[in-house]
Image (cartoon, rainbow, N blue to C red):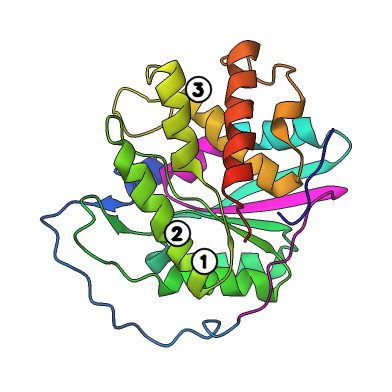
């Protein structure tokens, strides 16, 4: 395989609406309490080509839903490695930052990667929500030598611009506190343009279905492992045909080549 370098009910209740906040909600105050890790500005630990991957996820139902497929995909591209993956907690990052059990598990778990999803955003783009909790998770991860990866969720069905806005929001977070950023919305937009949206979305038009889960998992897996995912066409899960998987992998690798996730 070619490599690159550097480069549940509770869950559904807390995350079924995604991170986007409806416009009739009040704008949030940007004033926040001081955050102990906020000024930590170290380089991103690039934890790839490992003998063991210990991947922690935080976020809402989008992160929970992708977890089982992501574990399979990472294992597929790192067949000689041990892969452990766990969703540590569900919710928005500005709530999760006050979850002592989560912080304790993050600090003591010897994780190799932290995938961070759950940053609030305005669906219209008219409001600005604080990002300092997300930035603190990034800084905390780096202080523990954990590779942080921001997971901007995919767009809702029929709104490709949302995917672009959410990606750009997370890129701006990474400018404040350096982190890898997965271009998930960009991948989805390209893939849906070629394959149609039918198998990307569940009936609610928000959560993912098989092709969507695979698109997100391939994107995260290439960043986690450093493996170029379009180098292997062997079918990974039954719900995604091998030819579709190959096309998704091609789109993922191309999009990551065009949008360096860790720079």
Task: Report the residue at 24% width, 50% height from top.
Answer: 123
Q: Left or right: 140 with respect to 206? A: right
Element under disc 3: helix
N-term mark: 3 or 1? 1
* Total numbered badges shown on the rendered structure: 3
Residue receiving disc 3? 210
Residue 237: horizontal and vertical position, in percent? 64, 19
Would residue 8 be seen by someone viewing this image from the given angle? no
Q: Residue at x 49, y 74 (%)?
A: 176
Bounds of the magenta segment: 41-66
Q: Position of residue 224 (x, y in %)?
A: 70, 48
Helix, strand or loop status at disc 2: helix
In the rendered image, residue 219 lying in the magenta stretch gets the answer no
Q: Nearer the viewer, mark 3 or mark 2?
A: 2
- Crowd band around label 3 with a 10 angstrom C-alpha radius: few (<14), some (14–19), many (20+): some
Q: Foreground mark, 3 or 1?
A: 1
Q: Position of residue 128 (x, y in %)?
A: 26, 66
Precedes in sequence: disc 3 or disc 2: 2
* Residue denoted by label 2: 170
**Helix, strand, or loop for circle 1?**
helix
Residue at the limit of the structure toward the left, as seen here = 24
Location of residue 103 by image quarter: bottom right
Name the residue nearer the viewer: 209 or 177.
Answer: 177
């Amino acid at each position: 395989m070619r490599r690159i370098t550097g480069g549940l009910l509770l869950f559904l209740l807390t995350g079924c609406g995604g991170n986007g906040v409806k416009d009739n909600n009040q704008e949030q105050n940007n004033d926040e309490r001081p955050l102990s890790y906020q000024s930590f500005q170290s380089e991103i630990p690039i934890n790839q080509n490992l003998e063991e991957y210990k991947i922690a996820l935080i976020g809402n139902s989008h992160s929970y839903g992708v977890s089982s497929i992501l574990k399979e995909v990472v294992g597929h591209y790192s067949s000689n490695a041990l892969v452990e993956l766990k969703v540590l907690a569900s919710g928005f990052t500005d709530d999760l930052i006050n979850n002592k059990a989560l912080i304790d598990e993050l600090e003591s778990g010897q994780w190799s990667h932290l995938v961070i999803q759950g940053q609030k955003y305005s669906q219209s783009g008219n409001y600005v929500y604080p990002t300092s909790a997300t930035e603190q998770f990034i800084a905390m991860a780096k202080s523990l030598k954990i590779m942080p990866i921001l997971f901007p969720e995919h767009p809702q069905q029929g709104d490709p611009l949302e995917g672009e806005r959410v990606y750009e929001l997370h890129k701006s977070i990474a400018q404040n506190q350096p982190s890898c950023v997965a271009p998930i919305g960009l991948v989805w937009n390209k893939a849906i343009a070629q394959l149609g949206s039918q198998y990307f979305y569940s009936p609610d038009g928000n959560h993912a279905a098989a092709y969507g889960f695979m698109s997100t998992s391939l994107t995260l897996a290439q960043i986690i492992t450093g493996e170029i995912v379009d180098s292997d066409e062997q079918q990974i899960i039954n719900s995604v045909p091998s030819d579709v998987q190959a096309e998704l992998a091609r789109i993922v690798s191309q999009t990551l080549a065009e949008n360096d996730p860790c720079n």
